[in-house]
Image (cartoon, helix red, strand yellow):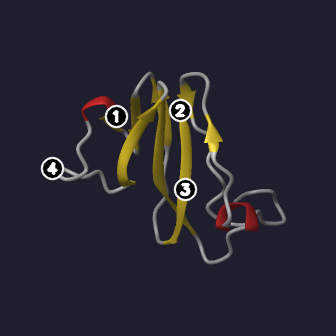
Amino acid sequence: MIITFSPIRMEGSLTASRSGSTLVLNGTPVDLASYDAGAEPCPWIVGQPVRDGGVWQVNLILPHGGDAPEATLFPRPLILEADGPLALPSYAAPTEDGAG
């Protein structure tokens, strides 16, 4: 699975994990195999996911704060080979105590 991101300045955060062809976005499962952006769109998915050569390609909204680091503002795609939580770019720049 290849996940690309569309960074957007907004309140709130995104948590995501993968299980086969299903993404769990903020606790809501979305089965990409039966997903239809035109019928009942998921607010976190941009456009229609595509399966190309057996690999899912999906674009997700990536919320970020006003002080987000460059890696969040210009994120690299995630290439997922296994199920589990997604390591998303940080919402905000780390603070001196390492939080963020």
Q: In 3D space, how far apart are the residues under numbered discs 3 and 4 (Cα atoms)?
A: 22 Å
Q: In 3D space, how far apart are the residues under numbered discs 1 and 3 (Cα atoms)?
A: 16 Å
Q: Which residue is mark 4?
A: 39
Disc 1 is placed on an element classified as helix
Label 2 near label 3: C-beta < 8 Å? no
Left or right: residue 11 versus residue 92 is left
User: Which percent across, then down, holds residue 1?
Assistant: 53, 32
Dot 3 crowding, Cα within 10 Å, few <14, some 14–19, many 20+: many
Dot 2 crowding, Cα within 10 Å, few <14, some 14–19, many 20+: some
Vertical placement of 64 versus 46: above or below?
Answer: below
User: Which percent across, then down, holds residue 20?
Assistant: 44, 21
Q: In 3D space, how far apart are the residues under numbered discs 3 and 2 (Cα atoms)?
A: 13 Å
Label 1 or label 3, whichever comes before in sequence order = 3
Q: Which mark is residue 1?
A: 2
Q: Name which residue type carries label 1.
A: Leu
Q: Which residue is mark 3?
A: 5
Q: In 3D space, how far apart are the residues under numbered discs 1 and 2 (Cα atoms)?
A: 11 Å
Nearer to the camera, 49 or 44 = 49
User: Which percent across, then down, holds residue 67?
Assistant: 68, 75
Give the residue displayed 84% in from the left and 65% down from the top: 96
